[in-house]
Image (cartoon, rainbow, N blue to C red):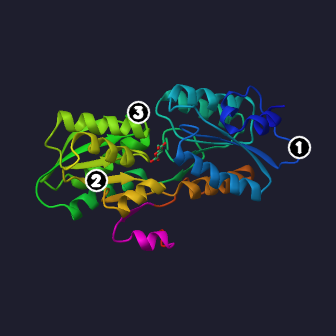
Amino acid sequence: MSFMGMIVYGYKTFYIQKETVAPNEYSYHFALVSEEIDNEYWRLVEKGASRAAAEHDIYLEYVGPPKADNDQLLKLLDRMVAVKVDGIITQGVEGQRFADIVLKGVERGIPILTVDTDVKSSVRKAYVGTDNFYAGQLAGKTMIKHTTGEQFVGIVTGRFDAINQQERLAGFKDAIQATERIHIVGIHESNITQVGAAQATYNLLKQYPSITALVGLSALDGIGMVEGLQEIAPNKDMFMTAFDILPETLQLIQNGKIDSTIAQYPEEMGYKAIEVMIDLQQHDLLESEIFTGAKVVNKENLDAFLKGERR
Ligand code: BGC
């Protein structure tokens, strides 16, 4: 019934399904738990995972809160454990509750992987995704390389309580710490939405008109930063670094509104996570951190990047 429901009503309603049963013809039933179901970035993770799932006759259930919310995500994760899927791929969430649910799942024989955001202190079997500290360092290094003189930095972060955002910020701070001319003046949250990022940018510039550089740490932040800047200081010369390679972000690099972005590979994360989960059905892994790479993309290498030089 729930499978029919999914077909009739589409994925969107799926997070409220009560019961999920994989039809018999599938080899395994895996769940992918995302930070926010309809977020463009997570749809790419899902796309890669669905492709791998189709290749291996796996029934993949994609779930996530309608708006980023740790509490709701944890409830979904708990439900996936309760219905005893064969494997769970989930974004890592801060706090003891996440670690407890993962422990419960693993004790019941359900392999659990983190994707996109890791929680090293949990008993998850492995992590597939970006090395977020390193990715944050890249954002810092590109700012050092492409700016001169004193810089006052405003940071737009997806969410304060997302571990990957904390790691990226730590990496950014680490990279700039020895460069005395670069100072962080303020950090605001976007709630991983474009309008949130526009608002955060507006507020940052209102509060600190001295800002000369903006850094966005999640996928829609760069796009929102351009919008927010347009509102409050359209003629101000600003060095802008974003995260991710959503088409609109690349377009903004193309027309010079954003200076650089840190590429992550969400489709590859999804694809790889399914492959790793298939392995985990047979045996434990030797390697528990599988990094999918990160790279600075700017006007200089954008064409090559688009032509396929993605690493
Ligand atoms: C992050 C994801 C986040 C997304 C939000 C990405 O940069 O890796 O964790 O959900 O941005 O748009």
Residue 115 can be seen, yes or no: no
Q: Amino acid at mark 1?
A: Asn
Of the residues under marks 1 and 2, which one precedes in the sequence? 1
Q: Tell me if the residue at label 3 has its CB under 8 Å from ligand 1.
A: no
Q: Tell me if the residue at label 2 has its CB under 8 Å from ligand 1.
A: no
Residue corresponding to mark 1: 24
Membership of 305 in magenta stretch = yes
Please tell me which residue lies in front, 125 or 306: 306
**Labelled disc at residue 240:** 2
Residue corresponding to mark 3: 161
Q: Is residue 57 above or below residue 108?
A: below
Task: Kindly report the distance in space between the C-alpha atoms of the residues bearing marks 2 and 3.
Answer: 23 Å
Give neighbour class at mark 2: few <14, some 14-19, many 20+ (Cα, 10 Å): many
Dot in front, 1 or 2 = 2
Give neighbour class at mark 3: few <14, some 14-19, many 20+ (Cα, 10 Å): some
Relative to 186, 82 lies left or right: right
- Element at badge 3? loop
Residue 209 location (% of width, % of height): 15, 40
Task: Kindly report the distance in space between the C-alpha atoms of the residues bearing marks 1 and 2.
Answer: 51 Å
Q: Which span is picked out in magenta?
A: 294-308
Residue 114 location (% of width, % of height): 56, 44
